[in-house]
Image: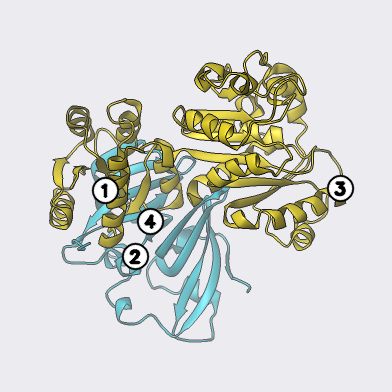
Amino acid sequence: MQRTNKIVAEFFAQGYRMSGTYVITKRLLADEIYDPTTNYFLLEEAYLSPITDPARISAYYALTLFDKSNLDFVLTMDKKDGLRRDQSYGMGTYQLPIFLTVPFFEITGSLYLTNKNFNPRLYLSSDAGIFITLLDVTVRSTFNPDISYQGGVALINRMHISFFGEKAG
Amino acid sequence: MGRILIVDDNYDMLSMLQMILERHGQHEIIACTNGQEALQVAFAQTPDVALVDVMMPGMSGYEVVKKLRADERTQNMGIIILTARGQSVDREAALAAGADDHMTKPADVEALLKRVDELLERAAAGTAAAPDVLVLPVYSVKGGVGVTTIAINLASILQQIGPTILLDLAPACGQCAFFLGIRPDKHWGQYIENPKTPVESLVRQHGTGLQVLLAPPIPAQYSWPNKDALETIMAQLKAMARFIVVDMPPLLDATAKVVFEQAQHIVLITGDDAPAVQVTRATLQALQEWKDRLIVIRNATAAGPRPPADALQKALRAPLAVDIAFDPNQVTVIPKGLPLAAVQPKAPLILGVKRIAQMMLTRQ
C-alpha cells in the first residue's frame, strides 16, 4: 500500500500509551524528537490508552501538544519512520544488544555503534540530545510482562532510564 | 464481486482502499468516515465484508465491530480490522471484539486482497459464522491434573470476550456441574437418547452468563456419543457461541478426535509427578497429527516442591507454554459453585489461565 506523508507512532509517557499521527512536512519524526532546541511536539489524531489496558482507547484528541522531556520513549513499527535523516544513511557497523528500563517498561533492542569499544557511562552522559535510538525493539510492561510491544525503532529518553546494561547472549 | 464496507476517518486511506478494491475485484464499495454512519449503512445494506479502522473519533473500530456482531443482520459478515495499531495486544483486542482478522497499516495489498477474497468466498458459501468459532479442548490422559478447573476458568475468561459454551464431554459424572453448582437435569445424554432434541434446549446458563452443556450425571445410563452425534452437537453449539471450551475426558478415540480436528488449539495439561510426565510424553506422541495446535501447560494441583520447568521440558521434549503454580484459592470457590475467575480475577491460577487465553487469541 502506498505510503503517505503521515506516520503513526506510539508515544509512551507516565503510564499512558498514545498512538498519534505525525505529519512529515519539513522534518522526519526522529529529527523533530531529537531537536534539542524545541521542547514541545505536536501530534495529530492522538488516541490515548492506559498501559494497564493498552488496547482500550480512553480518549481522542484531534491535536495534542506535549513536552518531549516527559516522554519515556517513542516506538515506530517501521525502521524508516524512526530514524533521523543522518541515521538513515548508515547506522554503524557494530550491533550491541541492550537491556534497559524506563518507568513501567523493560526494553531490549540493539544499539548500532561505529566503535567497538562501548562505554555505557560515556554513551549515556554524552551531550547528544536527550534521546537515544534503539533498533529491533521489544518492550515489556513491567507489571504485566505478557503485554509486549514490538518496534523497528525506539527513541528513548535517556533521562528516564534507570537501568542500562549490555544484554548477555 | 462483493459488497464491501470501508470505515476509516482518513480520506486518503479511504480513497486508496476504495481504488484498490474496485480495481481488483470490481467490488461495490460503500465508504464511511465514522462508526455511527457505518453502522447505519451496514444494517441497511448488509455488506459482505467490512474493513474497519480502529482509531476513529467518536466510536472506535472495536465498538463498531461489537455492534455489527451483536445485530443479526450483520453478525455473520466478514470483518477485518485495519489499523496502524499493530501490536499483539491490538490484534487480541480486535479478535476479542469479534473481527475475523487484524491487519496493520500500511497493509500488504496482496495479503489484504487475499483475505477479502476468502471472506467473500465464505459469505458466498453461506458458512459465515462457523470458521470463526474457536473450539478449545482442555485435555489430559491422566486424571487429577486440573483439566476441569482449567476448562471452567478458561471458559469463564473467554465469556467476558464473547459468548462461550463449556462442553463437559465426560462419559458420565462430569465434574463441571459440581464445580459450577448446576443441577445436571439437562445434559448431552438426552440428545443421544433422542437425536431430535435441539442441543440448544439442553444448554444450561450459569449465573455468570457462561453457557454449559453438561455430561450425564449417572454412569452407564447413556452411551458416549459416536463421531456423527458429536459432530451434530458441535455444529449446533457453534451456532450459539464464539468460543467452545471442551472439558475432555481422558480418551483418544474417534469421538475425541472429532474435537481435536475442529480445535484451533489444544490445551494439554501435565502435572509434576513422574506418571503425569510419562503420560504427557506419550500423549504428545499420540497427538503428533495436531502438534501445531498443542499448548502444553503445567498445572500444580498440590502444594510442595516442584521440579524446575527446564527439567520438565527436557523430560517432555516439548516447551511449556504456561506454568501454573498451586493456588489454594481454587478449593475455596468450589462450594460456592463459582469459577475462580469470576471471584478472584487476580488469583495466580487465573493469571495463568489468562495467559493461555491470551496465547490462543494472539496465535489465532
Q: Residue flagged by tag 2: what amino acid is it? A: Asp
**Mark 2 crowdedness (10 Å alpha carbons): few <14, some 14-19, many ≥20:** some
Say which residue label 4 marks. A69
Q: Secondary structure at mark 2?
A: loop
**4 or 3: mark nearer the eye:** 3
Q: Earlier in the sequence, mark 1 or mark 2?
A: 1
Q: Chain of mark 4?
A: A
Examine the rendered structure and indicate whether residue B196 appears above or below residue A67.
above
- x, y percent for residue B207: 58, 16
Above or below, comparing residue B135 to residue B102 in the picture: above
Using a 10 Å C-alpha cutoff, classify the residue at mark 1 as few (fewer than 14 neighbours), some (14 to 19) or many (20 or more).
few
Badge 4: residue crowd in 10 Å (few <14, some 14–19, many ≥20): some
Alpha carbon separation for disc pair 3 and 1: 54 Å
- Dot 1 amino acid type: Leu
Q: CA distance from mark 1 to mark 4?
A: 12 Å
Residue B165 seen in render: yes
Q: Nearer the viewer, residue B277 or A93?
A: B277
Report in which chain the residue with disc 2 lies. A
Compute the Cα span from label 4 to label 3.
48 Å
The chain shown in cyan is which?
A
- Label 3: chain letter: B
Residue receiving disc 1? A65
**Mark 3 — residue?**
B305
- Is residue B254 shown left or right of residue B39? right
